[in-house]
Amino acid sequence: EEKLSILRVLLDIARSDNDIDLNEAAYFTQICITLGFDPDNVDSILRTVNGRSVAASLFCLGQMSPDKKVATTVMVNEMVKADGVVEQEEVNVATAVLAAMFA
């Protein structure tokens, strides 16, 4: 559940500017692999993640251990920078995610 929650918020950050760049997609796939998912199943993972509630994901992230929160913070920051352009929409979503996670 934590892994899907992390992927949900990363996907929300990537698409917050209405464009998922190739570098953002590559980073998302890299995180899927890091979290133990099969890279050949990214389409299936996307369907699962899209069906997941944002509120449930944020709640789940808030319940994680401090170490996992730190690791997730790094992933969130990297997703914001993944396409090489830091958009205000991405910063806004990332800030909201981190605020909810550390509330």
Image (cartoon, rainbow, N blue to C red):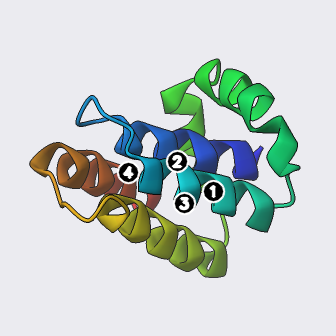
Residues under numbered marks 2 and 3 in contact, where contact means CB atoms less than 8 Å apart: yes
Q: Which residue is mark 3?
A: 27
Tell me if I can see residue 79 in this picture.
yes
Name the amino acid, label 3. Tyr
Q: Earlier in the sequence, mark 1 or mark 4?
A: 1
Tell me if I can see residue 62 in this picture.
no
Q: Position of residue 96 (x, y in %)?
A: 29, 48
Rendered position, 26 above or below 40:
below
Quarter of the image that includes the C terminus:
bottom left
Q: Which residue is mark 1?
A: 63
Q: Residue at x 64, y 18 (%)?
A: 51
**Residue at mark 3 to residue at mark 1: CA–CA distance:** 24 Å
Q: Depth check: give the residue in front, 2 or 51.
A: 51
Rendered position, 3 above or below 59:
below
Q: Residue at x 25, y 56 (%)?
A: 95
Name the amino acid, label 1. Gln
Q: Which residue is mark 2?
A: 25
**Given this view, does label 1 or label 2 mark the residue nearer the observer?**
2
Q: Residues within 10 Å of mark 1 (few under 14, many from 20)?
A: few
**Residue at mark 1 to residue at mark 2: CA–CA distance:** 27 Å
Q: Residues within 10 Å of mark 4 (few under 14, many from 20)?
A: many
**Residue at mark 1 to residue at mark 4: CA–CA distance:** 13 Å
Helix, strand or loop status at disc 3: helix
Q: Which residue is mark 4?
A: 97
Name the amino acid, label 4. Val
Q: Which mark is residue 37?
A: none
**Given this view, does label 3 or label 1 mark the residue nearer the observer?**
3
Q: Depth check: give the residue in front, 47 or 43.
A: 43
Q: Earlier in the sequence, mark 2 or mark 4?
A: 2
